[in-house]
Image: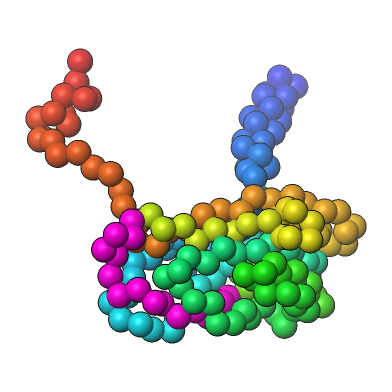
Amino acid sequence: MKLAVIAIVIVALGAAVPAAAQTPNVQIYFDANLTQASANCPGSVVVDTAYVVAQNFGMWMAAIEYSISYPTQMTWLADSPTNSGLVIGTSPAGIAIAWPTPLQAFGPAVVQTFTFLWTCTDCTGLSNTPLVVGNSPVSGAVDAVRWPDNVLVNAIGMTSLICSTVPTQDTSWGRIKALYSN
């Protein structure tokens, strides 16, 4: 019986390690469902919104700081923090956001949205143009503050793409099946 309990504990702890080992990051998404980290030029000059999301933090978040490097195809217009947070700076120059009530960041958490103007009408010559979440110019890092103990949690800034391309190679079904046969 003891051996079965020990085995169950080992399996449970082993399953928890990969979830805890995920690196906190900040990613930009182009849709409210947080599924599109890339977008194509819309076909005309339009105003649009994107979402800045803290992922894999697993904590209550009191504050966060980062910057965003916008490509020339996007003209930044305004930042809008989640939950009426206190904002110092702007996303292009470096932004710090603190919330009066900590933000629940145990899953993906939208820390802000930003409004921008698309200045491209098609993707001709624009493949894989980066939209980068970068370090805060104040701290030199992408950092968040954990509530209630105010521990600084370092994260990485992710890159979203404008006019992303996925390289492919022409082939036949026979060649694809051959990859999986002995």
Q: Is residue 79 above or below residue 25?
A: below
Answer above or below: position of 6 versus 157.
above
Check the picture and name the quadrant holding the N terminus. Answer: top right
Q: Residue at x 39, y 77 (%)?
A: 119
Q: Is residue 175 left or right of residue 118?
A: left
Q: Is residue 28 visible?
A: yes
Examine the image and state in which quarter residue 23 appears: top right
Q: Is residue 121 magenta?
A: yes
What secondary structure predominates along the stretch shown in magenta?
A: loop
Q: Residue at x 77, y 52 (%)?
A: 153
Closer-to-camera residue (32/1): 32
Of 60 and 28, which appears nearest the observer?
Answer: 28
Number of numbered tags placed on the structure image: 0
User: Over which residues does the magenta segment extend?
Assistant: 113-127
Q: Is residue 143 left or right of residue 176?
A: right
**Image coords of residue 114 (percent x, y):** 56, 77
- Residue 53 can be seen in this image: no
| Residue 84, horizontal then vertical, whole percent | 72, 83
